[in-house]
Amino acid sequence: MKFVDEVKIRVEAGRGGDGCLSFRREKYVPKGGPDGGDGGRGGSIFIVGHAAMNTLLDYRYRRLHRAKKGQQGMGSECTGKSGEDLYLQVPVGTKVFDAETDECIGDITKQDQKLLVAQGGEHGVGNVRFKSSTNRAPRETTVGKPGEKRELRFELQVLADVGLLGYPNAGKSTLISSISAAKPKIADYPFTTLYPNLGMVKGEYGQSFCVADIPGLIEGAAEGAGLGTRFLKHLSRTRLILHIIDIMPVDESDPATAAVILADELKRYSEDLYSKPRWLVLNKIDLLPADEREQFTQDLVKQLNWTGPVFAISALAKIGLEPLIKAISKDFMGEE
């Protein structure tokens, strides 16, 4: 399935039905009074959260969505049938914007959460409504009002507790596959991950948390290099960011320099995202002799002047994963 996280659509609520102009016509009832009924209201359009969805792909190919219009009123004071409301399902985590003003209309964060985005038109009234002691045979009616029409933009931001940030081939996909049942594509070339992957991790205390793996960033991402910052928005809802550093890059670049560059790209993209809790995770520690790992870690942390939590792991060999999971469970999942 193709991953689509942003689309524009047009919604048109239903028009209200017109009121009816009618008079009673019955045998042996001369001069029957007015009996024109009201029209039905127009159908409204709602956005509804659906936890089983993970892409906005359906809306990429169908941009116009119309609700049913209300039925016209009828004689014998019969009200026209109201137009059916239209419910558009979106993945949980979808923000809804007015495409013309860029105003955020709502944020769908729960299963079955509903958001009204286009109100159906008011119904017209029939001539029976205008009957009075001085107006026994009214011929007035009103027509139904048109429904709201709007241009909308959907923006999906995945709901995850922990986000993985790092260069391409830093081992993010390997990590999420090692600590959860997620099976992202893993290969020995850059940009293997082309869209966010989610994995549920069972915490140390039996409490699960969700991890999001986004495509890797490179220097110049803020200006659109590589996959740019398109997917960084998926980290905006996370409570913790794990900054994954490849300690033995294949291009023999300096891990400390790479860490600084990536942190700078994050800050240029969003100060709010940069200020989130961020832990340093040094990956591929298995490539070093066991007796050199601690000293290497200390030297790298010193180069970075890093004062936050640091974890040395091997996602592939599954070294150091338990302490990392335990720390996340304790500090961010409400465990003491």
Image: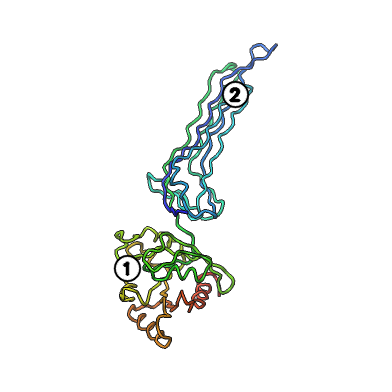
Question: In the orientation shown, which residue stands out farthest toward the bottom?
Answer: 291
Mark identifier at residue 319? none
Image quadrant assignment for residue 126: top right
Foreground of the two, 332 or 32: 332
Foreground of the two, 288 or 81: 288
Query: Disc 1 marks which residue?
Result: 264
**The C terminus lies in quadrant:** bottom right
Residue 294 vs 65, above or below: the answer is: below
Residue 304 percent location from the top left of the image: 34, 77
**Callout 2 amino acid:** Met
Foreground of the two, 108 or 176: 176
Give the image's coloring scheme: rainbow
Element carrying mark 1: helix
**Callout 1 amino acid:** Asp
Q: CA distance from mark 1 to mark 2?
A: 68 Å
Q: Left or right: 132 with respect to 214?
A: right
Element carrying mark 2: loop
Point 44% across, 38% down: residue: 149
Residue 256 vs 164, above or below: the answer is: below
For discs 1 and 2, the disc positioned in front in the rendered view: 1
Question: In the orientation shown, which residue stands out farthest toward the front?
Answer: 188
Query: Disc 2 marks which residue?
Result: 74
> Of the residues under marks 1 and 2, which one precedes in the sequence?
2
Query: Could you classify mark 1 by the number of other residues whose Cα lies within 10 Å: few (under 14), some (14-19), or many (20 or more)?
Result: some
Residue 251 percent location from the top left of the image: 31, 73
Residue 205 percent location from the top left of the image: 58, 73
Residue 202 vs 129, above or below: the answer is: below
Residue 33 percent location from the top left of the image: 63, 17
